[in-house]
Image (cartoon, rainbow, N blue to C red):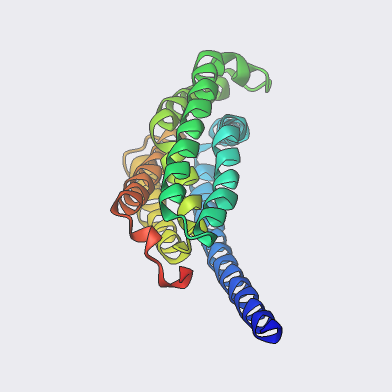
Amino acid sequence: PGDCHYSTGNYYARRRMTLLFSMLDYIGVENGMFQIGKLAVTSMVATFGTASIAANSVGYTVIDFANIPGNAMGLALITVVGQCIGAGEKKQAKQYTKKLVGLAYLGDWICNIALFLLAGTIAKCFHLSPEAVRIAEQILHCFAVTSLFIWPLSFTLSNALRAAGDATFTMIVSIASMWIFRVGSSYFFGIVLQMGVLGIWIGMFVDWGARSALFGWRFLSGKWLQRKALA
């Protein structure tokens, strides 16, 4: 019996490691494609002039702080959902996902309301030209309002799906949304409609909206808890 238990334990340990490395492969591919798409979008920004480039850089720098609560809850979801799924507690996995995404929204609202109110002051701290400050303030205002509603669904919730073994779905959605919505919409709003760097950010918001809708649908459908790899 001891040898049998040991062999069984080794089997499940190897299986867990196989699933882990498989998920890391998906995440690696997803991040690689994301960086390529981001490079394509950045090349569009470079055509708008130094004020837009500076404002875009400030925007990306500042929003990292506003996203800290959502990112923190996303990391927590990987551990919590993974533990629940490993214990066969799918109902708890769904409950904890709702709670942690709710906390992500709470933190997101606190940070982004503060960001909206202080956007002008923050932009001026970077000693930019008046034009760059104006563009940066506009970007931060748009980000703060949009993030209140869709950022946690777009980025925090996806970690729960990955932790449950649904990494294939999240990878396909993320890559498709990046190229169809972010790159495509950025070109349409920024270049075709001549909205400049703000159009690039609107394209990013469209990407977030698409991701939020698809990840939200996946979560509500319960299909993320039916992955055979979890058996």
Q: Residue at x 47, y 68 (%)?
A: 230
Q: Residue at x 60, y 34 (%)?
A: 68
Q: Nearer the viewer, residue 174 or 4?
A: 4
Give the side of residue 5 with respect to residue 223, left or right: right
Q: How many marks?
A: 0
Quarter of image, res 86: bottom right
- Up the image or down, 229 lies above or below 47; here it is below
Q: Nearer the viewer, residue 73 or 112?
A: 73
Q: Residue furthest front?
A: 1
Q: Horizontal and vertical percent for residue 53?
A: 57, 36
Q: Horizontal and vertical percent for residue 181?
A: 36, 51
Q: Is residue 171 visible?
A: yes
Q: Quadrant of the N terminus?
A: bottom right
Q: Nearer the viewer, residue 42 or 161?
A: 161
- Up the image or down, 79 lies above or below 167; here it is above
Q: Is residue 201 visible?
A: no
- Up the image or down, 11 lies above or below 202; here it is below
Give the side of residue 4 with respect to residue 188, left or right: right
- Up the image or down, 149 lies above or below 115; here it is below
Quarter of image, res 69: top right
Q: Nearer the viewer, residue 152 or 58?
A: 152
Give the side of residue 72 with respect to residue 178, left or right: right
Q: Residue at x 43, y 55 (%)?
A: 90
Q: Residue at x 60, y 51 (%)?
A: 79
Q: Horizontal and vertical percent for residue 126?
A: 68, 23
Q: Horizontal and vertical percent for residue 16?
A: 60, 71
